[in-house]
Amino acid sequence: MKALHINGNDLTLEAAREVAVERRAVLLAPDARDAVNRARAVVDALVAENKLSYAITTGVGRLSDVRIAGDQIRELQVNLVRSHAAGVGEPLSTAETRAMMLLRANLLSKGHSGVRAIVIDTICEMLNRGVTPMVPSQGSVGASGDLAPLGHLALVLIGEGECLDENGVRVPAAEAMRRAQVKPLVLEAKEAVSLINGTQGMLAVGILALLASEILVDSADVIGALTLDALRGTDVAFDERIHKARPHAGQLKTAANLCKMLEGSELRESHRDCGRVQDAYSLRCMPQVHGAVRDTLAHCREVMEIEVNSAVDNPLVFFKSGPGHVGTGASPVRAERSSAELEADVISGGNFHGQPVAFVLDFLGIALSALAGISERRLERLVNPALNEGLPPFLAAGAGLNSGFMMPQVTAAALASENKVLAHPASVDSITTSGNKEDYVSMGMTASLKLKRIVENTRNAMAIEAMAAAQALDFLAPLKPSKHGQAAHAAIRSVCPTMDKDRVMYQDFARIAELIANAKISAILD
């Protein structure tokens, strides 16, 4: 892949994943470099004039009324980074940390933060050379942004803290930077607060969860269609006329997917004239439930696409006049004019507050809980002899001697119920911090961490349904599902053989979950 040139304005969620997961290279765009240097000149002028400006010549948070002398400004940067790197718990994954680093660099590239371009260049070098900070996942309340997670990122930038090597082993940051030949920074005025203020922790976790969720909802349509076919359900409820009468975009999309999955199925034709009028909700209402999940995902994507290209640190630099440049190049720009002559305002606000992101992270967790819940209900219909249309009890060959899918349904039920607990919104909570200065917070990082667990639970519940649906279809041979259904069945069987007697199944579930995660099931709809 070609290197990604960031400018703070047009980063996509897909490009973020490419950098985070596929290790696409990242560089600061030339026009963004000019904007960054121009804003830096304003900060330098304020320092040179010893003007009062929040987080530039003062402390931060509750200590914002403490004036910092010019010869203490570098010391302030180090103290801020060290004091804010106060996280605990398991580290974020390498992909999540890399996403957070990219998002931070992209934010700084907008030219509102007042950092030197070398700060952005150093983050890009770390990404390109595989330097991954160890970032504890807990410690953020989601305003003034994800201070603790971002503090651990900033700590590595100054050569302190820890990194994770390729095997996930912790190594001193100084050693990791030395091996990668990345020079640690000596931070100048405002740079510490520009590195630690903002929503990039919750957003990094959230973006990867959203992209995984978009794969999950497509996979749910495929797997749900297999289950419906195995239970001899009808496709009448997916008639386009029904869904045009209630034209939610997600509902229309899922109905079309289900029709595509069932078209030409021998199983469907085998019972077309049966006396059953309609199916249970978990089968009949897949367009309405899966579709609502789709619409939720679309809303979450819209919010996240705005957030990835937003200025969310504090304070921000704004110019009053046109885009004339003050110097170019990668080196720091020392203002040759006063702050008044530069015609810029440095304004303190609250863009670091994570509420917009926290809300959609919670909303996505609620939606995925429904996706797992309806999957578990379809699974119950596959295994329950009172509901499974003559299939063997618990899909067991020789039921009684073999228990079949009795316990996998229990596992899916446990996952679905755990999701219901995790889906309780974090964003309705707040707790006062920083001496009551930061008195209403978003809890967005908590929402993102819960969401990550919900994504994993939902994927595993769907993997169990997929394995059970494939087993049910085996019992119905020689009748075959549609061509798309056969492709889905073959994909499942490529990692999981049919079960002719009881065996240990947890590895089967893991392989199918990986198949789902890698979009091998959802791709059948293409």
Image (cartoon, rainbow, N blue to C red):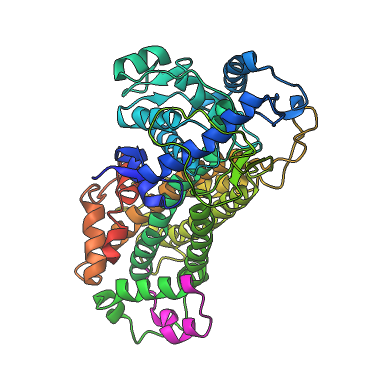
**Quick check: can you spot residue 505?**
no
Q: Estimate the x, y position of residue 513 in percent, counting from the top left.
A: 35, 46
Tell me if residue 336 comes above or below residue 351 in the rendering. above
Q: Residue furthest right?
A: 436
Q: Camera-side residue: 256 or 85?
A: 85
Report x, y in % for residue 439. Answer: 78, 37
Residue situated in front as seen by the camera: 389 or 278? 278
Instruction: Answer above or below: position of 179 versus 101.
Output: above
Instruction: Tell me the residue at 42%/53% (across/down).
Output: 10
Q: Quadrant of residue 94?
A: top left
Task: Indicate the position of residue 335 as horizontal and vertical percent values.
Answer: 53, 31
Residue visible at 45% across and 17% down? 162
Which corner quadrant holds the C terminus?
A: bottom left
Seen at 36% across and 67% down, the residue is 225
Number of marks present in the image shown: 0
Q: Is residue 237 magenta?
A: yes
Which image quarter holds the N terminus?
Answer: top left
Name the side, left or right, on which 22 lies relative to 418: left
Residue situated in front as seen by the camera: 140 or 417: 140
Q: Which residues are magenta?
A: 231-250
Q: Is residue 359 above or below residue 111?
A: below
Q: Is residue 426 magenta?
A: no
Which residue is at the front of the view, 481 or 335?
A: 335
Q: Position of residue 51 (x, y in %)?
A: 70, 28
Residue 164 visible, this angle: yes
